[in-house]
Image (cartoon, coloured by chain):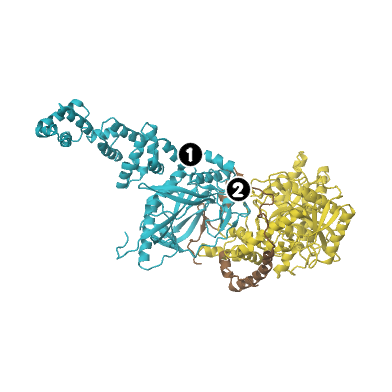
Amino acid sequence: MPIEIDIAHVARLARLDLPQAELDDYRSQLGAILDHAAQVQSLDGEPSTESEHPLGLVNVLRPDERRPSLDRDEVLAQAPESRDGYFVVPPAMDSE
Amino acid sequence: MTLHDLTIVEAGARLRSGETTSADLLAAVLDRASQTEAQIHAYLTIDRAGAAEAAAKADADFADGIDHGPLHGIPMALKDNMCTRGLETTASSQILAGYVPPYDATVTTRLRDAGAVLIGKTNLDEFAMGSSTENSAYGASYNPWDIGRVPGGSSGGSAAAVAVGSALGALGSDTGGSIRQPASLTGIVGMKPTYGTVSRYGLIAFASSLDQIGPLARSVDDAAVMLEAIWGHDPLDSTSYAGEYPDLHSGMGRDVRGLRVGVVKELSGEGYEPAVEEAVATMVERLAAEGAEIVEVSLPTFDIAMSAYYLIAPAEASANLARFDGIRFGHRAEGATTNALMARTRAEGFGPEVIRRILLGTYALSAGYYDAFYGQAQKVRAAVQEDLARTYKTVDVLVSPTSPTVAFVAGDRVDDPLAMYLSDICTIPMNLSGDPGISVPISLDHQNLPIGFHVMAPSLGESVLFRVAAEVERLAEFTAKPVLQEVAG
Amino acid sequence: MTSPTANPTKYESVIGIEVHVELATKSKMFCGCAVEFGAEPNTNICPVCLGLPGALPVANAQAIEWIMEIGLALDCEVSERSIFHRKNYFYADLPKNYQISQFDIPVCHDGHLDVTVDNNTTRIRIERAHMEEDTGKSTHIGDGGRIHSAESTLLDFNRSGVPLVEIVTRPDIRSAAESRVYAQELRSVVAELGVSDARLEEGSIRFDANVSIRPEGQEELGTKVEIKNMNSFRSLERAVEYEIERQIAAVDAGRPIVMETRHWDEEAEVTHSMRIKEGSSDYRYFTEPDLVPMLMDESWVTAVREGLPELPADRLVRYQSQGLEGDLAGVMSAASTPVRSVYENAVDSGADPKSAANWLTGEVTAWLRRNDTDPTDMSLDGAQLTELLAIVDEGVVSSSAAKEVLVGVLEGEGTAREVAESRDLVQISDLSALEAAVDAVLDANPEAADNYRSGEQKVLGFLVGQVMRATQGKADPKQVNQLLRGKLAS
């Protein structure tokens, strides 16, 4: 059963600016993988429990305490562009 | 025995007896690296200065009577998806070229605190997505047993380094088999602990509910010693287990008399090389001869486990990799708007396998498809857990081949994602369940390529796991080492 | 305000409000960085709140307790089991390009807040209160600082990861005024709990409104429009009012309402279209695998509830036990926090609860409405109300004069006694002065006196009136009445 994939839409959701030829390739690869992965629908019945942390961890919370932050210079040294302590990016208004 | 061939335990004995020094061990492995790297490309970064400093410190500590334990002074490597402060960490991706983390992963800290000497960062499939280390943006790694073949993946660099002697031990990460499968293909021990026992803080995430860090080593003993240094509760990881941890050593050295060993029916047959199946069957017989009770078991959910994995893992990965956007760190492409910048950066920075999985994961989570794909995969996952729980009522451990085949030829599966994914068919169920698994080398096939024996146990069942693994190792007497053609310096 | 056309359709406005409350915890929701307003940019950051590779979240216990408090104060159910989800979308101020939030199992759900506007109380249902993390802040720089003409954007991640509680009502609100009062009341509740600074101007509380209209009597909801960027309670009210009018005008003119997000422009006093919502965005929610479920069992919820200040339902019972009956108890209990606070203080300083409640829900509320004054800004406090009631009791002023005294107090002229003096409203209580006034009137009106004596009872009213006039209304009519009777009888 061929699966319908709007690959352009998926690529947009994932912020991947790919040329059409590549998108076409990915679409057919995805189709093949999903055909195989669709096997999950052959599961008999419903499991009785929800899949959770294998050791059943719950209520893992930390006390409201301050811990040291990172040194700003060390962090901004990794930034592609920074100015006066800020990360710099182009304006937000986008053309999708 | 040359220094670089020692196990961690052996090296530790010599350090304490004064027979060798940490500096000598380091020199030996670095020398080995310079002899072998051109052929196997296990490393992305070697930190000579940092390692020398750590080795000197270790030697000074010993002289002062300070002893941090079995890893003290031992040269070790880390897979390059584990953050090391001040040392480039790339996850083998272009998108992180030049990225220097401002913090250490918890495992990095624990190794440093244990006095280990960190040699450098090893190669992997980009973002740990792959089974051959051919998906690295910085070039593939190769198998020391045959450099025309893959070392497996995604922890191929770590496996190759340990197998060849350019590290005495290394850490890898295992999401679908990425420690165990390369261990099997390179003839060493590789182990994935119970999910939650080793902190993931500082591990560049692939699939959060499946990733675990674990040891690649030359012996079961070494693997145990490494595991004890890195596991334990971490308050920085919400999924970290805070209860009592198993005792690894009490079981090792004990026989397997009376232990019930389940042979998984579904992990055999078509796609499995005869040599592999034979070697595994022979070992099972040997265990029986030692008094183990062999039971054939069937876990029908194992047949669809891989399908569930290939929906869950990419789905989580698609979200985990969203942070790579060129805004705060890493590669940044040109773009007049933030949207354009992000989309260009990601298309430029990610390799095809990563893009494939991001697209797959995004699709599996998207509106209209969630229930049929991701939602259903989680049900399969729960069913796998139930299947195992039922089975462990009648057996203590499960066994299978680690990989259906020995190391395959480089380039053979790179264009066939599905064929590549099948490499993980034996290992994936333990990632879905969170249970521990270990690969122990047992023999070579007629092509002189290693075969690995896979042992599985219930969650927190590391005691019985290591007990059986130790016995398998003893029975196998696998002492072969890869021989590389000598290459001029 | 609707356009006067022939046979105009009457519309009902249907409003829902989303509130985001920043919790005033010491550290962030998922990491130990400081929560601090106004710090130097990017100084309170770490791998977790910066979204660096390898980072992992660990939930803040205080934040969980506080969202439970908020939920309980709003009479919500606390979920027995609650989980976090990833809400996936790309935005430069969202470091992981997903927000850790909650999807279908929020910590709190199905509560309400009763809101009183002009003594009409409406129950606004709270659909849910859920936990999430805040984003970083972006500053656009370029010509004029407006988004459209910005050269670049500066990002500060200090705010990224601050605990945020999102509270969503059902579309039960019906007017702009009600929207404002709901917002103010919710803010009061949150501030009273001490869980947030809740300052609109600082952004520690933020309001978005979803506005739609439908013809009266129609059950089906109209297309809703989201309004953002209202930075005061006044602008919230004005924005909602504007939007209702805009929608009515559009529908009357035959133009369909587009489902979209609009920005309130404070200067121009209009809403601008921001972006078209294509259906709703595909956030691809899935359970956050880096966090584990929270189980809020009975004993935990009870412990949190016990630590709370008084809840509305309990307050109603308490007021009833003070002697407030029927509607009065309900209206007083649902009155705004400043008004209630006057009541409480008055009763504490000895005022009769019924009288205090009657004055507050009656004359005081009427004055506030007439003068378009916010209760937070009124000049009456508990002590002054008590004094007002006292001077009526003592007979210093008549009950009708007291209304004027009240106005004087509300207008900031001084205490009740001071206003009674300065506005010359003090009753004449001196018996001899009254007698003199009565005598004077009887002398001046012998016919009326005779008529009374010969049986015309109602002449008494005339005579009382004459005394009141002579004393400029400052005589106590009851006393005058008594004196007259006495003198006429003899």
Q: Is C150 left, or right, of B33 in this rendering?
A: left
Q: Colour of chain A?
A: brown
Q: Colour of chain B?
A: yellow
Q: Report in which chain the residue with disc 1 lies.
A: C
Q: Is C13 left, or right, of C286 in this rendering?
A: left
Above or below, B430 relative to C335: below
Q: Amino acid at mark 1?
A: Pro
Q: Amino acid at mark 2?
A: Met
- Is there any visible trace of residue C379 in the rendered image? no
| Residue occupied by mark 1 | C309
- Is there any visible trace of residue C344 in the rendered image? yes
Q: Report in which chain the residue with disc 2 lies.
A: C
Quadrant in which the C terminus of chain C is drawn: top left
Which numbered disc covers residue C332? none
Crowd rating for badge 2 (residues with CA inside 10 Å; few <14, some 14–19, many 20+): many
Above or below, C430 relative to B93: above
Q: In this view of the protein, which residue sits in the foreground, C463 or C242?
A: C463
| Residue occupied by mark 2 | C294
Q: Residue at x 39, y 53 (%)?
A: C236
Q: Colour of chain C?
A: cyan
Above or below, B138 relative to B67: below
Residue C372: horizontal and vertical position, in percent? 32, 48
Distance from Cα at disc 1 to Cα at disc 2: 24 Å
Q: Is B51 left, or right, of B252 in this rendering?
A: left
